[in-house]
Image (cartoon, rainbow, N blue to C red):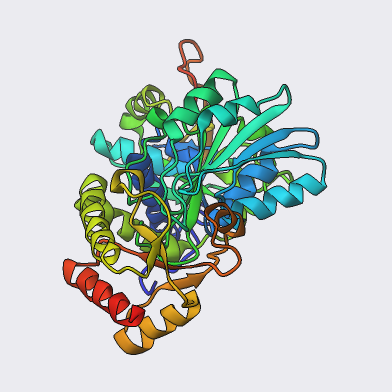
Amino acid sequence: MEEVGANPGRSGHLLSIEAARIVYGAREALSVLFHVKDSSRIVFTMNATESINLALKGLLRPKDHVITSSMEHNSVMRPLRELEKNGVELSIIPCSKEGMIDPREMEKRIKSNTKMVVLNHASNVTGTLLPVQEVALITRRHDLLLLVDAAQTAGAYPIDVERDGIDLLAFTGHKSLYGPQGTGGLVMGERVNEKEMVPLKQGGTGSRSEFEEQPDFLPDRFESGTPNGIGIAGLLAGIQFVMEKGVEQIRRNESSLIEKLMMGLRKIPQVKFYGPENQKDRIATLSFNLEHLAPSEVALRLEREFGILCRPGLHCAPAAHRTIGSFPEGTVRFGLSIFNSETHVETAIQAVSLISK
Amino acid sequence: MRSGSFDQVMKYVFLFESIHRVMRAEKILKEKGISVDLIPVPREINSDCGVAVEVDLELGEEAWRVLEENRISVLECYTKNPSGKFEQRKPDLQMRPKDI
């Protein structure tokens, strides 16, 4: 910040240009990570929530029909409920107790006015990975757009927007991309017509300054106002860290840790798990409860007695908790990352075991 | 009043639609060994507040070819003589690849 605290792309002086280079570098790095051919089709936002709002509100019009799952976070559910008030038709596909969707059930709900399918890539409650590629075969066959909320997977699970058939990919910088809070973005595939997509905001872009109308080209159309240059510099460092480790390697490490954690917790009779048993069907996010103990109580004791931080409750995803049968009390959730070790996992198992007694 | 660099030689000045394209142009031209300078868009040629790419005259045509090969569309192009006078250049519009 001391070195390049200037506004990217707003001036020709060297600090502004250096800031623009950093933003460009982050866009390019993301395009490599997610296999996006043209990095101008990645726009920066504050977080996954803003990206999802942009995609939904930018593309859906009254009388359009949109399909989603019962495992969605409120970042998807709330904008959809708002759009519903304005005449957008909404179908929510019930998922199994493990949080899994049946793509055939989804296909049955497609109608002549269906425009989009919105799915989380992995649940923030159960860690369940949804079959995005299978769903994409259906959305492509019916000429629908597929919006994927990758808040839980970007950086932790391989994503290739071309191979996976993802038209819109919403991601956040502050989770598995190891960037700062307040960074995120939306990838817009070639099937998305950006000219028909309404920006959430209009304003200065550093381009076409002589015109009072919003530019219609990417990424400027959706990036009004001074960007979070400092945050994006941090995000770039995070992406570089992820790419050095390798997403496949990160996935392997986290899978082996979650397997170890589940194996240990399974031996505690009072533990009730949520989500898939097989680590292949999940990411390193695990929800559980202890018999006769409220999630908040377990979390408090984990912190106060063992220094283990986790998140209890509903995780901003009431629909998901209804689906898995943990509404309204919620669950205790552990989230593992590249910075966790086997020792951490052993400590956690021991702590839960002691609390359960 | 003069804009851009103070070299007393002829220059090529390229304008682009967005800072993203300027960055992409800079990266690709540098990769091809063409040395570039980024300057504020000269007021004489455009009222935009953005950044323009400047290269030495003898590298101008080659730079333009590289940009088109890489499908980076140039909004406008000028030559600038040492006294700071700009003259617009038109690209060969035939066989232009589709812009991305």
Up/down of A333 relative to B37, above or below: below
Please indicate, yes or no, whether residue B79 appears anywhere in the rendered image: yes
Question: Residue shown at 60%/26% (left/top)?
Answer: A144
Q: Position of residue A216 (x, y in %)?
A: 64, 37
On screen, residue A9 versus residue A244, left or right, reads: right
Q: Position of residue A226 (x, y in %)?
A: 57, 61
Residue A252 spot, x, y in % from top left: 21, 49
> Residue A133 placed where, x, y %?
42, 31
Single out the residue that lies furthest toward the top.
Answer: B94
In which quadrant will I find the C terminus of chain A?
bottom left
Residue drawn at (41%, 47%) of the image: A27
Quarter of the image with the N terminus of chain A is bottom left
- Image quadrant where residue A196 sits: top right
Does residue A299 appear to the left or right of A48 in the view shown? left
Which residue is depicted at the point 49% across and 10% down? Answer: B94
> Is residue B56 or residue A157 the one in the foreground?
A157
Q: Nearer the viewer, residue B8 or A327?
A: A327
Residue drawn at x 61%, y 66% is A328
Q: Nearer the viewer, residue B62 or A76?
A: A76
Q: Is residue A202 visible?
A: no
Farthest left residue in view: A343
Question: Quadrant of the rendered structure where residue B46 is?
Answer: top right
Q: Is residue A151 above or below residue A37?
A: below
Question: Would residue A272 be found to the left or right of residue A247 on screen?
Answer: right
Q: Residue furthest bottom?
A: A304
